[in-house]
Structures are given as structure tokens and as C-alpha cells.
Image (tube, rainbow, N blue to C red):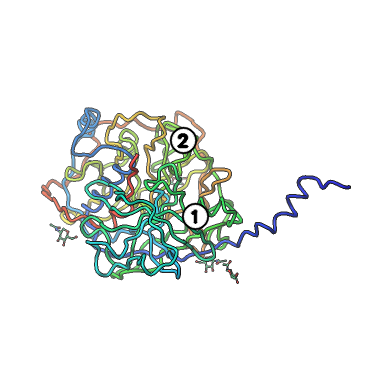
Amino acid sequence: MVTLPLAVTALLLVPAFSAADPIHIPIKRRSGWPATHMDHLAAAEFMRARYGYGSAATPTPATKRMQRRAGSEQSLNFVNQQGDSSYFGTVNIGTPPQSFNVILDTGSSDLWVADSSCVNCDRQTPVFKPDQSSSFTQQRNTVTPISYGSGNVAGFVSTETVSMGNFSLQNQGFLSVESVSDQLLTGSVSGIMGLAFGAIASTGAVPFWQGLISSKQLAAPEMAFWLTRFRGTKFSEEEPGGSFTLGGTNASLFQGDIEFLPMAGPSQPTFWLLGVSAVTVQGKSLKVATGNNALAAIDTGTTLIGGPSDDVANLWAQIPGSAKIQSMPGFWSFPCSTTLNISMAFGGKLWPIAPADMNLGPGDNNPQICLGGIFDLTQGSNIEANQGNPSWVVGDTFLKNVYSVYRSDPLSVGFAQLSDLAGSSGAPGEGPKNDASTTVGPAPTGTSTGGATSQSPFMNTTLSLLVLLPALLLSLL
Ligand SMILES: *[C@@H]1O[C@H](CO)[C@@H](O)[C@H](O)[C@H]1NC(C)=O
Ligand SMILES: *[C@@H]1O[C@H](CO)[C@@H](O)[C@H](O)[C@H]1NC(C)=O
Ligand SMILES: *[C@@H]1O[C@H](CO)[C@@H](O)[C@H](O)[C@H]1NC(C)=O
Ligand SMILES: *[C@@H]1O[C@H](CO)[C@@H](O)[C@H](O)[C@H]1NC(C)=O
């Protein structure tokens, strides 16, 4: 009897797994919602909370050092940024399926939706109705909270049939949420789908995308995002925001090769992490911490880019007229007439960020001074590098400029240039050559020549829901 070689046997077995074609899910996005500079500040605070950094309210000595070094500060009001906010897609839960908009978030790992017992949900928010599903099972009798900054969601860890397109899992763990912090959910978004790794899931459940991979439903162990920026002028509750592909990529949305960069960080993956290898500003390479000392979480669920104190201060020090903003700890302003040319590399090419994405708009008391899209995430925190915690968070400000791909085997994040169909983006540049003569920094003192001096005693505690949402899922570790 002839024994088939192993490879041939494996080939014959392939049809049994019959993985499906990738699915392409339209992403929707809020637009034109009334973001204020406090929304950005809130977003920064929640990003800090998500990634384990302390609040700006209690600066460490290191922070104080930074502040002394940074020279003069700006006091400005920033309003109406027309910011791009959360990107969401549709997931089906239950039998028969109930359809919900959930934020697609590569920076967290839990799935949750508000349910019909929700005591403080907005009346317009569609809620999951467990009693109308034959496949719903509540797994725990105790309430599980998920905490973030100044609020939380709470509910019951349950299992359900969950599907996106043709991909479906029975007994998917999720949090059926019965209470949310004040005004947390408004409009049509009912929850979050976390697309990071199970190790940081508060529910303990295997994330949906990982379940699809282990049940061999995906032809390729990949998820990909095209995220658009706001181009309109007037408020509309929802508008197209790009496209999410599960189980592959959509070749019509990018051009050239996808540069896959190996994951950095702990051996048991948590967030989608890459090691920063270079940051350039106005064509000059910054001296930055790199590699495992500079882990970057690639996070579709946050809007801005946050980085370590020294590197961010050094970056802004290269921009004449930039200054710290007194009323917004960690943020810088810069002259609106300056075109910011900033690129980031993660071991390969330099990926440019469009100047428009780095400029969050003018202050309302000085239209010549604009808010910058990179802020100080760590605020001088002395959390040690090389412990697996990211010191950079690379959010939509960067991700709108690339087609991004999240691949679990081999573990990597890929970036490609957007195609013309996807709105096009700048071609990547050559990666760094580590030529010390072309690197700049550390930050010199007194870089500011800014003119705005008026005070902004601006303490708007009404936090924008859409900014809070992506930052919700602080792990209960
Ligand atoms: C989904 O499944 C149906 C029926 O099996 C099939 O006709 C369709 O092509 C599938 N769609 C995708 C996107 O795979
Ligand atoms: C790829 O994305 C474009 C733009 O969203 C869409 O029109 C197209 O249908 C997608 N391709 C596939 C195979 O679905
Ligand atoms: C922006 O910076 C990159 C990287 O340093 C450089 O290659 C490019 O020429 C610059 N673009 C402009 C318009 O200055
Ligand atoms: C605070 O925010 C709310 C809602 O975003 C807004 O209605 C209010 O005018 C803001 N207050 C100030 C002082 O900007």
C-alpha cells in the first residue's frame, strides 16, 4: 500500500476546512460631532488609563522636570475640531440574529453590547434582547464591570451566537451590559468589538476574531482596515468611514506591497504592538527610544497619537513656535501656517502622516495657533520600558494614512499605501540609516515664540461619548 506524503495528505484534507472568502464590512463613522479641545484631552486621559499611565492631575517629578524644560506655555481654547471619531461596523448577535453597530477596536479585546436591561442607556441606542434569542446563555451570576477613567460599564458575562457576514461562532463569550456611565452610549452604536488578544480580555472570553481563526473559518489569519477622514462640512450622524476586511485583504484599497512588520512585546500577545524604529519631523530624524523600549500599540479605537514624554517634547521642539498648552496637559500648539511633515517607521519604511491629520484645528481665541495631533502619553511616568507596556499609541491620526493589516500568523502588523480608490496616501520613504549626524534632539529649552497669552479656565466635564467609547475597556488585570 502506498503511503501518501504528508504534504499531499494535508492538501487532500483542505476542502474539509473550506475556509470562506474574506468578508468586507462597510465601516461607518460619526462626523461633525461637536468635539471640543476637552474631548481631545479626555481622549488622552482615557488612552493613558487604557495603557496604564497615570493621570495628568498627579504629575511625577519627571513630568515636572519636563515642564520646566519646555519653556513657555500656551493657553488656548480649542473647539469644533470636526474630528474623525469612532469607526464602527455591524455584528449580529443571537438566534434569530439581532444586528448592532459596534466600534471595531484593535486596542481592546472584549465584545460587549448594551442589553434590554440597561438602566441608563440612551433611548435611541439599539439594545440586545436576550429574551428574544434562543441561543443566549448567561454564564456568571455576578456583575462584571469594565472600568475606565471616570466611569464604567457593567453586565453579565454570557455566551451567544455571534456572526459577521458568513463567519459565525456559537457560544462566543461577551458582556451583556446592563449599566453604562452617564450618556456613554448615544445614537446607533451599541457597544465595542475588541480585536486585540485574549490575554487582556476582561471577560476572559476568546475574542471573536481569534475564535474564527481557531475554528478555521478564515482563509487568511488577517483583518484589515481602511479608515477614511472626514471630508464633509456639515453634521451628519453617520457617514461612510472606510472598510473592514475579515479573513484577508481587499486588493483594490491599497497599492504596492504590504510591509508586514513582526510583532514586538511580550511572548503572550496583548495589544497589537510594533517597535518604533524612527520618527522624522520636517525631514529630520529624531533621536527616539526604539525597539522594545518603544513599543507602539496600533489602535483603531483611539483617535490621536500618543508617545513618550521625551520623544514627544523633542518632536515639538523641532517646530518653531510650538508650545505646551497650559490647559491641556500633554498637548502642544503650533503655528497654523506650519505644514507638519511627520513620518513613523516600525523597523522598515517611513510611513508619512498627512499634515491635515497632524493639525487638529485652530484655537477659538487665536486662529493662528493650531492644536497638534501628537501628545505626551506617558507624562513622565516611570513605568519601566521593556515591560511589555506600550509607550506609544498609534491611533487613527496615523492609520487613516495607510491600509493596515493585523495578521496572527506569523504575528505581524502590515501597512500599505492607499490606492487611488481608497483616497490615496503618500508613498513611504526609506527607513532610517541610523546616521547620527542627521538625528536631532533632545529637546532644547525655550522653543516657544507663540503669541497667545489669554487664559482659558476651560473645565468642561461633559465628556464626549464617542471619544470615551474606544477607551472603555480597561483590563481588570
Ligand atoms: C456566504 O454564504 C453563502 C451561502 O453559503 C454564499 O452563497 C456566499 O457566497 C457567501 N458569501 C461570502 C462573502 O462568502
Ligand atoms: C473592496 O473595497 C471596495 C471599496 O469599499 C468595495 O467597493 C469592494 O467591493 C471591495 N471588494 C470586495 C471584493 O468586496
Ligand atoms: C517629509 O519627510 C519625509 C521623510 O523625512 C521626506 O522624505 C519628504 O520629502 C518630506 N516631504 C515634504 C513635503 O517635505
Ligand atoms: C461643554 O460641552 C457641552 C457638550 O459638548 C456643550 O454643550 C457646552 O457648551 C460645553 N461648555 C463649554 C463651556 O464649552
- Mark sitting on residue 403: 1
**Dot 1 crowding, Cα within 10 Å, few <14, some 14–19, many 20+:** many
Q: Is residue 287 above or below residue 129?
A: above
User: Where is residue 253 drawn, in percent x and y?
Assistant: 53, 61
Residue pictured at 13% horizontal, 50% vertical:
459
Tell whether 189 sits left or right of 219. Answer: left
Please state the total of marks drawn on the protein image.
Answer: 2
User: Where is residue 199 drawn, in percent x and y?
Assistant: 44, 42
Image quadrant holding the C terminus, namely top left
Between the residue at mark 2 and the residue at mark 1, the CA separation in whole angstroms equals 22 Å
**Which quadrant of the figure has residue 320?**
top left
Q: Quadrant of ligand 4?
A: bottom left
Q: Amino acid at mark 2?
A: Gly
User: Where is residue 380 drawn, in percent x and y?
Assistant: 27, 32
From the image, tell me which residue sits under label 2.
265
Near-viewer residue (25 or 205): 205
User: Where is residue 30 drawn, in percent x and y?
Assistant: 33, 64
Tell whether 305 sits left or right of 418. Answer: left
As helix, strand or loop, the secondary structure at mark 2 comes to loop
Q: Is residue 7 above or below residue 101?
A: above
Residue pictured at 30% horizontal, 35% vertical:
309
Q: Amino acid at mark 1?
A: Tyr
Residue 427 in sight in this render: no
Q: Is residue 321 above or below residue 24?
A: above
* Label 2 with label 1: CB-CB less than 8 Å: no
Residue 22 in sight in this render: yes
Near-viewer residue (266 or 19): 19
**Dot 2 crowding, Cα within 10 Å, few <14, some 14–19, many 20+:** many
Q: Nearer the viewer, mark 2 or mark 1?
A: 2
